[in-house]
Amino acid sequence: DDHYEGYYVQIDGLRDENIEARVNQRLKAFYEEVRDEDGVPDMEGLRARVAALDYTRHEEYISVNIMASIGNFISVTCNHSETFGGDNWLTYDEVRSLNLDLNTGNEIKFTDLFADDVHAQGVVQEAVDRAVQEGERRMQEGEPEEEEGYVEYMDDVLYLKPGQDIGYIGDNGDLKFYVSDYTGDMMIVFDHETPQFETGSSYYVITVPMEGRHAYDQRFYNGENIYETEGQAFCLFARSLNGDAEYVYDSEFEVYNDIEITYGTAHYEYKDLPQAWNDYLILTPEQKDAMKLQERTFVDQVFREGWGPDYLWASADYSCFAERYGNFTVLKRDIYYTVSYNSPDFFQNLRSRDYYCSQLYYGEETEPLELKDLFAEGVDYKTVLRNAIKQSIDANEPEYGYDEARMQAWLRFVLDDITGFYPSTDSLTLIFDNVYEHAVDYFPDDGELWKFTSGSQNISYDFIGYENLNIFR
C-alpha cells in the first residue's frame, strides 16, 4: 500500500524571461532529483533496516519551498520524508537546500552571503563549536538518550560521536544551508553527510547569526530593478533585544466576589535603550489600577450571566518587550484578561480579551512615529490600507462572506481605533482595541465569532504595495 505526495514551487515576475525560465527549471530539477532517487539515504544503517523490515505500508512526502526571498536571491529547501509500516514502523526525514541568485540564475555558495571583510568559514566554525559545546553541556547534565535510530530535531545543538573530531565545517565551500526570511540568519543542516555528528535518521539545524556580517544588498543588488513591478524591497530582519535585558516579574492576589484573582506584571529592562522607552514598558500605578478594574468588570459580567464562584478562575497578566525590525524598534505591551470555569469535568472560557498597544521608533530618534510616517510622500495611506485590508480579508477569510457595507464599516473601525502599529519582515501589523464591542455594532449576526479575537491584523506588503511605503528605502 503506497502513498506519495510531492510538489515544487515556481517563480514569476522577473523582467528577464530567460533567467526566470532557468530558475524554474532548476527548481523543478531540484524536486526531481529527490523524487527519482532509488532507495533510501545511507544514514545510520537505514538501508539495511528497511531491507530487513517486513512492511505493508509505504508513505513518501516531498515538498520544495522558498524559505526566503531577500533582495535578489532566493533560499529554497526540499523536505523529504518516508515511512515504512507494518508490524513495526520506521521513519526518516531529510532536508536539502538550494540558493539561487535571481540576477543570473546561478547557484550561491554560503561564502557568497558574507561581506568581503568577514571570514565566512571562521564564522561558521564558531557557530558549530558553540553547538557542540551546548551538546556536551546537555550530556553532562544527564539528558535522557533518544530512542535508538532516532534523534529529535533540535536547533543550535550538536552531539559529537565518541572519538570523532569536529573538523573544519564548510572548508570546501560546500554546506547544506538556507536563510531565514524572519531574522536573515543562515541555517546550516547537519545529517548523515556530516557523519561525525549524531543525527540518527533525521537532521539537526544550527543558526549562524548574520547581523553585521552579510552582504545581501551589496552583492545581489546593483541598483537595477529586475522585477516586472516597480520598487525594490529589502527585508526588515527581526532582532530580539531580550538577550542582554533583565526580566522582572511581580504578582499579587485579591479575593473579589469570592473569586481569587491573580494579577501578574512582567517587563524587560533594556540596558541599551533610552530610559523613556523603558519607562513606557512599565505599568504606572494608575494603569495597574485600570487593569484591576477591567478584570473585576469581567467577573461582574460572569456573575450576571448566572455563574457561581465555584470553579471560577480569573487573572490579568501584563507583559511587554522590545523588538527590532531593520532600523525600527517597536515597544509592545499586552494585557491578557480571562475568566474561566474550570471544574474537574468541564472547562470554558467565559471572558477572554487581549489589550495590545505599541510605540514605534526609527533609529535613535526619541519621538514615536505616526502611522502616516511609514508611507511615501503624497500617498493617501488610509485609502491604501483600506484597500489592502479588504484584499487581505478576501484572500484569507472568504468564509465570512461580508457584504460591502459591512466590510466598509469594519475598515472604518480598524483604521480609526488603532492603538499601535509596526512593520515586520513581510507585513504591517495594526493593533486595535474593543474588537468585540465593535463587532457586535457592525456585525450583529457574527458578533460571537469575534468574542475571543485578538486585536491585531497583519497586512501583507504585497497588498499594500511596496511603492506606497518608505520603510525599505
Image: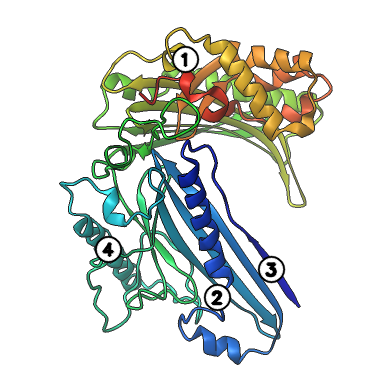
Crowding near pointer 2: few (<14 within 10 Å), some, many (20+)? Answer: few
Q: CA distance from mark 2 to mark 1?
A: 52 Å
In which image quadrant can residue 187 be found? bottom left
Marked residue nearer the N-terminal end (2 or 3): 3
Crowding near pointer 3: few (<14 within 10 Å), some, many (20+)? Answer: few
Inspect this view and state whether residue 417 appears. no
Q: What residue did someone put label 4 on?
A: 173
Question: Which three-letter amino acid code belongs to the residue tagged 1?
Answer: Leu
Query: For numbered disc 4, what is the local secondary structure?
Result: loop
Question: Which three-letter amino acid code belongs to the residue tagged 4?
Answer: Gly
Q: CA distance from mark 1 to mark 3?
A: 48 Å
Marked residue nearer the N-terminal end (2 or 1): 2
- The residue positioned farthest toward the left in the image shown: 117
Q: Position of residue 252 (x, y in %)?
A: 48, 33
Crowding near pointer 1: few (<14 within 10 Å), some, many (20+)? Answer: some
The label shown at residue 37 is 2
Q: What residue did someone put label 1 on?
A: 371
Question: Which three-letter amino acid code belongs to the residue tagged 3?
Answer: Tyr
The label shown at residue 4 is 3
Q: Position of residue 100 (x, y in %)?
A: 41, 51
Q: CA distance from mark 4 to mark 1?
A: 45 Å
Residue 302 lies left or right of residue 26; in this view the side is right
Q: Can you tell which of label 2 and label 3 is closer to the viewer?
A: 2
